[in-house]
Amino acid sequence: MLPLVSVVIPTYNRLTKLSELMEALVLQTRKDFEVIVVNDGGESVDSLKEYYPELGLTTIDLMENVKHVQARNIGVSFAKGEFIMLIDDDDLIVPTHIETMLEKIKDADLVYSDVEIVHYEKKNGVREAKTRHLFAYELDLAAMRRFSTFVPSGCLYRSYLHDRIGKFDPEMKNYWDWDFFLRVSERFTVARSEVAGVLYDFSEENSNQSKDLNSMRFYLDRLSDKHNLGELPTKNFWLLLEESEVKKREASSKIVWNGMPIISRLQRLGRLEEA
């Protein structure tokens, strides 16, 4: 029997965080999904098959690092499900997330979730939440052409979308997700899940990337030209959230994470060093 959902995860040298995501997937209330991990030229992730046999992992080992957008495209090409869910290897989802998203997508082609942005600190090799910030904004298609609040990690969409609009565009680089959302919303129905079912890891690494405004400007202009968006501001992530146009879209959301860390089997068994 084919899986209902294909979970596609690109990864590059993040085995510890990836193992925590595997634990989060095992805890899902819905079980009719497959997991496709695209190892983008990094360290082996084969140990996850041994420690999470019930997930029936499909691992795709790339010989070179093709970067995250193309890695997702490769993963999507292996998907067998009616629906595809994207998750970044350093993010987590709550146990009811897949169930909630499947319910929400009944009247849509793509649904994305509110998230909690989490700053972690490591204690005894385990990520524990230091701060939590709700990221929840009303879905306004016109406003999304100015400031995107679409978070691709944890989103769910019908797999036939790729047959209709193509794969993710590597030429958009930083803005591949915004480009995908715009292309989908032009022709199909999108929806927002008012449940913070995704735990988005905003690490120092991600923070540094958001400060690289010069390289972002080039790809933002490329996105704008592609979709006729006009002049778009380039700012640090947190400064963008203070823009009045974004502030007025702030929305309430259901918080479901209990704040407890997710500890993988490899962590509990002390096997990550040898993995």
Image: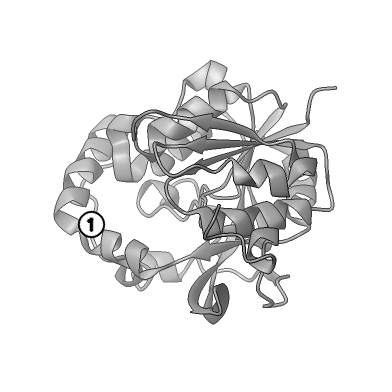
Q: Position of residue 134 (x, y in %)?
A: 55, 72
In the rendered image, which residue does mark 1 sit on?
233
**As rendered, which of 224 and 255 lies closer to the eye?**
255
Amino acid, disc 1:
Pro
Q: How is the image coloured?
A: one colour
Q: Is residue 12 left or right of residue 190?
A: left
Residue 150, above or below 69: below
Point out the image quarter for the N terminus: top right
Q: Nearer the viewer, residue 76 or 103?
A: 76
Viewer-proximal residue among 129 and 163: 129
What percent of the width, then of the height, locates residue 234? 22, 57
Instruction: From the top left corner, tell me how far across and down residue 159 is, in percent.
Output: 63, 26
Q: Residue drawn 58% across and 30% down?
A: 188
Q: Residues within 10 Å of mark 1 (few under 14, many from 20)?
A: few
Q: Does 247 sit left or right of 96 as displayed?
A: left
- Of 171 and 246, nearer the camera is 171
**Position of 10 compared to 253: left or right?**
left
Left or right: 184, with 197 as reference point: left
**Identity of the residue drawn at 66% across and 52% down:** 22
Quadrant position of residue 31? top right
Give the answer, above or below, for where 270 lies relative to 131: above
Which residue is found at the position 17% from the left and 43% from the top? 218
In the picture as drawn, the residue positioned furthest to the front comes out as 274
Task: Label 1, secondary structure: give it.
Answer: loop
- Asked whether the viewer can see residue 45, the reply is yes
Q: Position of residue 5 (x, y in %)?
A: 72, 34
Q: Residue at x 72, y 51 (%)?
A: 25
